[in-house]
Amino acid sequence: MAAPGENLRINSDRLWDSIMEMAKIGPGIAGGNNRQTVTDEDGEGRHLFKRWCDAAGLEMGVDEMGTMFARREGTDPSLPPVYVGSHLDTQPTGGKYDGVLGVLGGLEVVRSLNDLGIKTKHPIVVTNWTNEEGARFAPAMMASGVFAGVLDQADVYEHVDKDGKKFGEELERIGWKGTEKVGDRKIHAFFELHIEQGPILEDEGIDIGVVTHGQGLKWLQVTLTGKEAHTGSTPMPKRRNAGLGMARVIELVHEIAMDYQPDAVGAVGHMEVYPNSRNIIAGRTVFTIDIRSPEKEVLDAMDGRIREGIDTICEALDIQYKIEQVGHFDPVTFDKGCVKAIRDAAERLGYTHRNIVSGAGHDACWINRVAPTAMVMCPCVDGLSHNEAEEITKEWASAGADVLFHAVVETAVIVE
Ligand code: HGY
Ligand code: MN
Ligand code: MN
């Protein structure tokens, strides 16, 4: 397919201004964002995105998981569209760019096509996937997982947040539960622009990450049950301390991940202690183990060793345990044709680039199961993300969006 031409560039100022405008919705306490999925702030961000899509002449569809699909018509409407997007929901202490760059980068592609009066054969659909983060309601990449047929819609509707609110009810409450059946849409190809969320591109001074693979992930939610008792008057040998159990499991997860360096990772970021009183021995702890690796065998080995370790720890402390797998996807290999479109675009535009494996999970990891998919990444400052101090430069955002522009338009085929 003919390349769309050397001079195609997005409007960098407009993209950056849109990102800053979206960042005003659901502000964090330290300069980032707290726009968690299906909160009022998420609803407000969705309305702003829809207004922009309306202004760009796009036709909006919303499915039963609340995912938003903004369609720019192609010269042949019968062809399956090229989808481009990411997510607008954020972590509770998230940054301004995680997910947002991909959705607004997709919108900028369409805005630029409109400015240039360029038509494409395939329609183009800008997409905002619901609940990518999985912070408020597990698992991550929830809506794209239902779309790909790996998660059950009725089941995830019942998932609850820490206040006992149900995902399905919250989606309805904010008014973004659509009527389209999830997963019926046919996708010609899907492209996602995302910040790297790691240090490689910045450390190496490289503009573009050509994402060839995504590492696999497992989230194990563990409940340890001991016995509440007085921290002062209960003799040490008589204690059944679920807090001590959690501490030992957290150390175990770290040690096991360190056994599989340089690629494996493991941590526990979510922890709840009951009753969480200064002078009561913790009777129950609930926490989530997050382990990841680019290799399935390593992921499975870590999983097995952690389960054995938990059994040993709990026997020694005379506490019970329950392990539920609340998130999982195997390592992902993205579509070679789509990856080439991204690499060729970076080459053509004169951006430095390198192959990279995504450390974070993305909606693209699930959509890759139902359509040819690839990702383009830009650097982020100090590789920092899932932190309100997350930062990128305008130049990095523009370079990523330019590459996205070329990859999308080339795949959607320009009509001369
Ligand atoms: O957890 C992840 O990798 C993604 O940020 N949801
Ligand atoms: Mn993200
Ligand atoms: Mn994220």
Image (cartoon, rainbow, N blue to C red):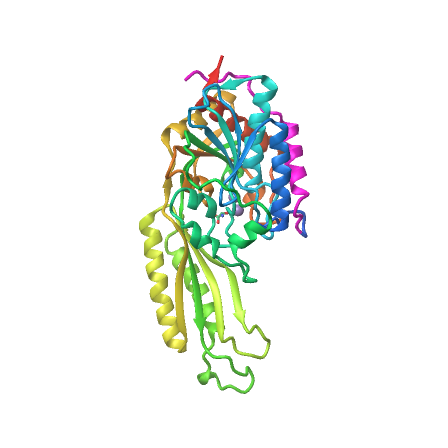
- Relative image position of residue 132 (x, y in whole percent): 50, 46
Residue 313 in view: yes
Describe residue 403's horizontal placement relative to residue 52 as left or right: left
Circle count: 0
Describe residue 5's horizontal placement relative to residue 11 as left or right: left
Residue appearing at x 68%, y 43% in the figure: 24
Residue 37 in view: no
Residue appearing at x 54%, y 87% in the figure: 233
- Relative image position of residue 199 (x, y in whole percent): 52, 42
Q: Nearer the viewer, residue 254 or 285?
A: 285
- Relative image position of residue 200 (x, y in whole percent): 49, 40
From what the image shows, is residue 339 above or below residue 131? above
- Residue located farthest toward the front when viewing the structure as drawn: 179
- Residue located farthest toward the top when viewing the structure as drawn: 416
Magenta run includes residue 12:
yes
Magenta run includes residue 153:
no
Residue appearing at x 53%, y 59% in the figure: 161
> Looking at the rendering, in which quadrant would you find the N terminus?
top left
Q: Which residues are magenta?
A: 1-28
Residue appearing at x 54%, y 17% in the figure: 118
From what the image shows, is residue 283 above or below residue 131? below
- Relative image position of residue 123 (x, y in whole percent): 48, 25
